Amino acid sequence: MARVMILDDEPDLAEICTLVLEGAGHLVARWRPGEPVLASIARFRPDVILLDWILGPVRGDHILALIGREARVVVMSALHGVEPAARSLGAVEFLPKPFSPDALIAAVHDALYLQPEAPNL
Amino acid sequence: MVARLEGHPFADLLARRKSEIEKRWQERVQTDGGDGVGLSGALSDYLEGLAHTLSHPHAIEEEAQVWLESAREHAVTRGRSFDVHAVIRELEILRDVLLEVALEEGMIAQPPFDEIVHALDVPIAATVSSYVQARDSEAKRSEAEHICFLTHELRNPLAVATLAAAQLRRMGLPTAVQERAAELVERSLQRLRALIESAAPPSAESWRAS
């Protein structure tokens, strides 16, 4: 089991990702739009972060630039061309939307076990 | 035809009577029923470009680039908000005014009169072409941006529906989770339908036109 935090401003997508990941045995927390992002991450101390590239008024790349070297981040985006930029900022996995439950679970697994150890936040 | 117009007197005339030409053009456009919006703000540059064309000992077709750059810049600045037909009509009026001024100055009797006409027609044709290209380019860019935006917006509800539908196929899920997944599928389909409705052409006529 891992602690997974979802940062997506689409509440339905965050909810269904939560259902999928909880079904796979993970402990999941969702960021709510309007909450301070970094404080939410520091409070939950996730093992893996699922980050939407465009987070409403907050830009995912700005968040990634702050935490991408410190945490295992999986970037999700409907903008498929941003993968190189996401990886250059430290994303360990990239999920192009739409994706299947298996792809989501595999991305979290790979972020946890196939990437070099990252220090906790 | 490649005309050479070194030291052409019409360039001096343009510099000397520029304000008068602009005023006369404005009055003519208004009489014609136009508002002068198409070339608004660009006429002064066009006249200077024409004077430049006439003052340089190069081929007119090459010097038309001076006008062309001005026209392209103006068209891009105005985006899609101008009417190309109005611009063409305003350029025709400008041509008439310039020839009228040339006649008043007695240039009709001089050998280079054909060259003046040519010097006006070449950049006007190039200008119209430049406007049309700029308008088409802007239309394509807007369409590409709209498709990119729409694709992005469609992928989010599609992602929800894909995940939720896959959840419904799993055996042994709690009833509450199944019901919530079904609700999310329905909500996503509603969002997809709304997005498609908002982007779809309103009628068969507009579909054919596109």
Image (cartoon, coloured by chain):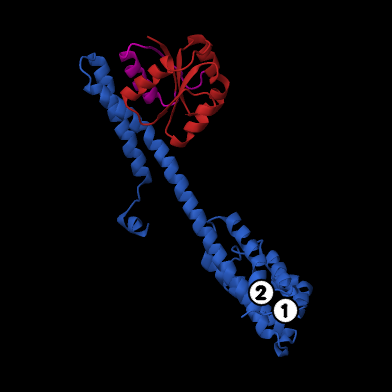
Frontmost residue, A106 versus A2: A106
The three-letter amino acid code for the residue at tag 1 is Leu
x, y percentage for residue A51?
A: 46, 23
The chain ID associated with circle 1 is B
Frontmost residue, B18 versus B157: B157
Label 1: which secondary element: loop
Q: Give the position of the C terminus of chain B as an image quadrant.
A: bottom left
Q: Is residue A17 left or right of residue B126?
A: left
x, y percentage for residue A67?
A: 55, 19
Residue shown at the point (68%, 85%) measured from the top left: B113
Quarter holding residue B153? top left
Q: Earlier in the sequence, mark 2 or mark 1?
A: 1
Q: Please say whether residue A32 is one of the residues in the magenta stretch.
A: yes
Label 2: which secondary element: helix
Please tell me how crowded label 1 is: few (under 14), some (14-19), or many (20+) other residues with Cα within 10 Å: many
Please tell me how crowded label 2 is: few (under 14), some (14-19), or many (20+) other residues with Cα within 10 Å: many
Frontmost residue, B151 versus B5: B5
Q: Please say whether residue B168 is one of the residues in the magenta stretch.
A: no
Provide the residue span drawn in magenta: A8-35
| Discs 2 and 1 share one subunit | yes
Name the residue beneath numbered marker 2.
B60
Q: Is residue B12 left or right of residue B59?
A: right
Q: Is residue B202 left or right of residue B142?
A: left
Picture colour for chain A:
red
For residue B53, above or below residue A82: below
Is there any visible trace of residue B33 in the rendered image? no
Is there any visible trace of residue B208 in the rendered image? yes
Quarter holding residue B52? bottom right
The chain whose colour is blue is: B
Circles 2, 1 touching at the beta carbon (< 8 Å): yes
Residue shown at the point (33%, 55%) measured from the top left: B207
Name the residue beneath numbered marker 1.
B5
